Amino acid sequence: MSKIIYMDYAATTFIKDEVLEEMMPYLKGFFGNPSSQYSIGLRSKMAIESSRDNISSAINCKSDEVFFTSGATEADNWAIKGFAYANKNKGDHIITTKIEHEAILSTCRYLEEEGFKVTYLPVDGEGFVNLDQLIDSITKDTILVSIIYGNNEIGTIQNIKEIGKICNEKNITFHSDAVQALGKVPIDVKDSNIDMLSMSSHKIYGPKGVGALYVKKGLKLHNILHGGGQERGKRGGTENVASIVGFGKAVEISMNTMKDEVERLSFLSNRMIEKLLEIEGAFLNGPEGEHRLANNINLGFRGVYGEDLVFNLDREGICVSSGSACQATSMEPSHVLLALGLSRELSKSSIRLTIGENTTEENVDYVCEQINNIVNRIRTVRK
């Protein structure tokens, strides 16, 4: 194996040099606890607030509406559980979709065990929510709608602005998991009437183990972590200063480069989709064009198991996945692909390729060639 070609950027990304450089002083010299009153502690506190400013600017909210977490899974749990418990006197009904990340679905299933009612909206063959179905699902007891911004498996970008408008008109709180969308889609929580937004660092070339939740000022939300008075009394625990600094720097870089990078990734992903669809029996999962995340390619190959493709590509030094990294060890077909209407067999024949900063046109052409060879080889063996 001469080199690694990484095409699983939706699972995680490497830390950029500029991000790591920004983090290093807070791992060594400025290691002080940000709750301390002496200079190295105050320096840490200032660094956290600078990162908070970067993130609030990226999504158009106030700085004190951003709360740091250990990642998007915590942010999702906090948004849904925290809001549900704090507002159960107003209603007990939550609306989400069948194609959410497992962090949302597991949280909603947990709340069902706690007595809450949850509606899981279906999607069409490209992964879009029907807005009329959303409206029809709203009842007098509906307190929260949670719909993913850009899907992690098939790249579908929902009509977030219209969903936010519906929720705003119905006086229902709207949460969105924007983990895959941040840095790839312009996000404006005010314009889109988003009340809570989950974000993650390690999807945008920042460190793992840190994320954030935007919470609109005035929203009632119970804490799920209790401890000291950190994060303005909302999330106990000494802050992960260096990682928060890295997250803030990664957001700053992604905002500065997003327009050009999205254009480049769109060209490469479109090229890849076009080439792979030339393979007999290939089919695209999710939408084409502007309503798909620029770096996402999800295709199936009839008569070939996605797991076999992943294994054989890995032997060639090519890293792809058969779905979400959080469910990579499961032998069950993707719940997202099943929700599109695919059979279990076709769902198991799909792979996800997500490209990023180090992906080149040469990489794309080489990977397409290797996939074509492997698909044909597997089909020949199975005949």
Image: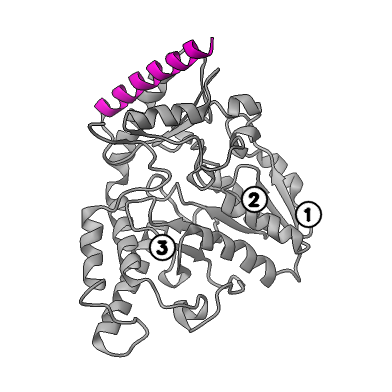
Q: Quadrant of the N terminus?
A: top left
| Residue 163 on image: x %, y % | 60, 48
| Residue 54 on image: x %, y % | 33, 63
Q: Tag 2's secondary structure?
A: helix
Q: Can residue 342 be seen in this view?
A: no
| Residue 140 on image: x %, y % | 79, 58
Circle nearer the N terminus (1, 2) = 1
Q: In the shown orientation, is residue 263 left or right of residue 187?
A: left
Residue found 39% across the figure and 44% down from its top: 184
Q: In which quarter of the image is the C terminus?
A: top right
273 part of magenta stretch: no
Q: How far separated are the C-alphas under marks 3 and 1? A: 35 Å
- Label 2 neighbour load within 10 Å: few <14, some 14-19, many 20+: some
Residue found 34% across the figure and 81% down from its top: 34
- Residue at the spot of label 1: 139
Q: What residue type is labelled 3?
A: Val
Q: How far separated are the C-alphas under marks 3 and 2? A: 31 Å
- Residue at the spot of label 2: 166
Q: Give the range drawn in magenta.
A: 362-383
Circle nearer the N terminus (3, 2) = 2
Q: How far separated are the C-alphas under marks 1 and 2? A: 13 Å
- Residue at the spot of label 3: 210
Q: Tag 3's secondary structure?
A: loop
Report which quarter residue 142 is drawn in.
bottom right
Residue found 46% across the figure and 61% down from its top: 71
Asked if the residue under mark 1 is in contact with the one under mark 3, i.e. CB atoms within 8 Å, the reply is no
Closer mark to the observer between disc 1 and disc 2: 1
363 part of magenta stretch: yes
Instruction: Pick whichever, 214 or 43, lies toward us.
Output: 43
Q: What residue type is labelled 2?
A: Ile
Circle nearer the N terminus (3, 1) = 1
